[in-house]
Image (cartoon, rainbow, N blue to C red):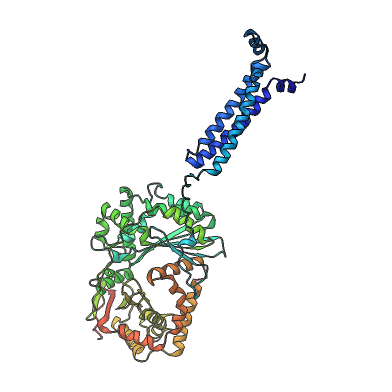
Amino acid sequence: MSLYSELRRRNVLKVASLYIVASLLLVWLTWVARTQLGLPHWAEEFVVVLLLVGFPVAIMFAWVYEITPSGLKKAVDVDQTQSIVFKTGQKLNAALIVTVGLGVVAMVADRLLPDLAVPPPPEPPAEPTVADVADAALGGDVPAEIVSFTLGNGLRVIVWPDEDIPNVAMYNFVRAGGRNEYPGITGLSHFFEHMMFNGTSRLEPGEFDRIMEANGGSNNAYTSKDVTVYQDWFPRSALEVIFGLESDRFANLAFVDEVVESERGVVQSERRTVVDNDNFGRLFEQMFATAFVAHPYQFPVIGWPSDIASWTKNDLEAFYRRYYAPNNCTLVVVGDVSAAEVFQLTSSYFGPIPPQTPPEPVRTVEPEQEGERRLVIETDAQTPLLHVAFHGGSATDPDTLAMELLLNVLTEGDSSRLHQRLVERDALAISVGSYQQAGFDPGLIYFYLTLAPDADPAAAEAALFEELAAAIDEGVGDAELRKAKNILLADHWRSLATIDGKAEALGEYEVFAGGYEALFERPGSVEALTADALREAAARVFERRNATIGVLRSAESTDDEDPS
């Protein structure tokens, strides 16, 4: 007789079949109970494990008592004429019928009973995407690929994808500069520019630069009277590494006493180089200290010597918490990136940094100047210096763009009015230049002249004021205005030709002009300016009572008579 026939005759196959059918039914009933009555989610897995363990036990039982000699001998020893399993064959048949019947009843009941299923737990909210948080489309002349958004902690982010080269420029504008300081902590903003490269709770001093350079990147930073800006340039392959480095120093800056004292010495040395031992720097510092009597623009960005020597660790930690917070920063990323990946990286690396209470606003308003101010510095100077400054407007003042055009007419290039008069015609100056301080608050319109060694500062001053008076009385000609507009527009488009220029321009307009959109309004605004607008701006600014005049000259020089 074959093994199969023997197994079937002795009910081993019947035992296996009944076990399988009963197991399937039990698994199904467990699923119904879990979904209808709220059994734990692991109930089905638990039953399946028990059944898998029990199946070989049942088969082993049937095999032992039906096939093996010891099992058959036991049946004889207990005076049984038939095997134990064979005698229970009819009972197995009955059990199979009952099992099938119970299954049918369970299926009917499942249809008739009300649905008692416990509602599934709600799906976790989907992770936000850049599309969820991006600002509304701006239209107009703003490139469509630019995306801006603000994280939950207040960090403002602007992304301008540019795939021309596989590089990235990242600028982080921190709203902390000389205007946020007061006597006792002047220069602290600039000091943090140094400290931010000197280690965190995770990185030792110098590791920031080492890691960045190892990944092909470079960096720099600068501090002004309004902001501190951190700049990174790196290949796309280092994108996540740089995000990790930047977020670490904005969250975990270390204040190690030895490092603080070392950097204090570096700043003191820098001050000696750019101010104390530099004639231009000395006069420039004293000009601001004289032109402003109330507003913190009067303080030197590098700090007064006594303040540099006396900053405390508490001063540093309080300044860091107050100003180096995500809600006080604007991050600009330009280059071979997508808005989606920048959103993911900023969310992952900068998102966990908590916001801080916003810094107190600068409430001091510089009072209107009521009379001409003068200062003279006598020192070892081979060439005298003449600086003249006037109070002007802020970055958003309507006159600021008109003044930028006018300064271009007055000092830009060899054909400019002041160069032609002071350098070429009268030979009073070796060079002449100007700049406009366009910050958060009204700043200065500043002229700086390096005079010929034997030149008379009073004569140079008189010639300068004559040309400024001509700008008020006669205005500028059409050719001069067109030239100035062409230069400004060429500079504008040239600055946007590189990822570095784009990053800097986006950040400056976002921070100072109230929105980066103004960057793309600039060409139209320049073209709209008229000669009358320039003349009116000049009339409001170039008044004697609004002027601060500084001269740096050799101590051996004789005092010149005041030309006014």
Task: Look at the image and tell me whether residue 340 can be seen.
Answer: yes
Above or below 79: residue 305: below
Q: Is residue 224 left or right of residue 141?
A: left
Give the image quarter of residue 47. top right
The one nearer the camera, 167 or 101, is 101
Indicate the position of residue 448 as horizontal and vertical percent values: 34, 76
Above or below 271: residue 88: above
Indicate the position of residue 534 as horizontal and vertical percent values: 38, 85
What is the number of callouts on the image?
A: 0
Indicate the position of residue 464 as horizontal and vertical percent values: 33, 84
Q: Residue at 71% across / 21% down in the picture? A: 7
Pick the quarter of the image with the N terminus.
Answer: top right
Pick the quarter of the image with the C terminus.
Answer: bottom left
Indicate the position of residue 358 as horizontal and vertical percent values: 31, 61
Q: Is residue 556 left or right of residue 491?
A: left
The one nearer the camera, 518 or 451, is 518
Task: Look at the image and tell me whether residue 269 can be seen.
Answer: no
Q: Residue at 25% across / 63% down in the picture? A: 182
Q: Residue furthest bottom?
A: 474
Give the image quarter of residue 395. bottom left
The one nearer the camera, 201 or 96, is 96
Give the image quarter of residue 530. bottom left
